[in-house]
Amino acid sequence: MITSDTPHKSDVDSSISVTETPISAPAQTINSPAPPKVITLIKARRGWQTVNFSQLWAFRELLFFLVWRDVKVRYKQTVLGAAWAILQPVMTMIVFSIFFGRLGKMSERVTGEYPVFAFAGILAWTLFSAIVSQASISLISSSNMISKIYFPRLLMPLATAGTALVDFALSLLVMLFLMAIYQVLPSINLVLLPLFVVGITLAGVGVGTLAAALVVAYRDFRYVVPFVVQLWMFASPVAYPLEIVPPNWQWVFAVNPVVGMISGFRSSILGEAYRWDCIGISFITTFAILLVGLFYFRQVERRFADII
């Protein structure tokens, strides 16, 4: 029970019901009586709850602060600072070029230079995996805030997406540098690049919010998520082209939401033909996972402060 002179309904979650009862103020000796106080009774609602986008917008400044905090903490007291966001995909590209490109003869099955092909896939995958990995532990790492003050808990996994996008922007500069070295000219397909960046981000947020809620409810999931993400990379066309999969199985392969996103992202950068059939299936899967993740997150959100 919260007593306040002026109730703020925007500060109350949509998953709770609010009942306001005015209480008469005691007799005043002055001519202008004080306004009656209001008691706000907050009760949790049962059942599935939708995302309160108006409340998320009201807390947009807090979202910006969380992103800025994560970026500062991520590179604080590091030797190379923000260069880690560049070194990780570059070193992965070198390893892929040696083992998959030369030893695995994968360079003969792609158009153009394999390092550029591999780095495009790594860039898209790194964005997705960073969002999932960081979002899955975002609630646990911020347990002090969650247990003491109220704010939309969905801001935590959303903030990790903002941090991953900052790293992605830095790595994208390396992609432009590689294209200049290997003389890969950008095509008109580049205008669709933001579409697939948004798709990868939504897929990461969907999986990340679902994983974050599961990690809070079942603590052993925090050890399962890194293992699943590692296996997920090899089940996605990061180091190999989509065409290596038999044509009859490509639509099944595209149920993996990252498959169509990586394929479209790579086609936008390298100017290749789009596989709209696989891209369409991956977008449908992305929105399905996003809805499931958000609804499950909202379902268990009211218990976070008690079990975290």
Image: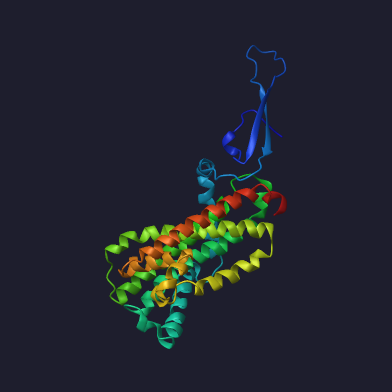
Coloring scheme used: rainbow
Judge left or right: residue 206 versus residue 35.
left
Q: Position of residue 254 (x, y in %)?
A: 45, 66
Q: Position of residue 226 (x, y in %)?
A: 59, 69
**Of 52 and 109, the residue lying toward us:** 109
Q: Residue at x 70, y 13 (%)?
A: 29
Report how many numbered discs are placed on residues in the image. 0
* On screen, residue 247 above or below 283: below
* On screen, residue 31 above or below 206: above
Judge left or right: residue 155 versus residue 215.
left
Which quarter of the image is occupied by the C terminus? bottom right
Q: Residue at x 48, y 65 (%)?
A: 255
Quarter of the image for residue 151 reads top right
Visible residue check, residue 68: no
Q: Position of residue 219 (x, y in %)?
A: 69, 62
Quarter of the image for residue 111 reads bottom left
Which quarter of the image is occupied by the N terminus? top right
**Of 208 and 155, the residue lying toward us:** 208
Residue projecting furthest to the bottom: 103
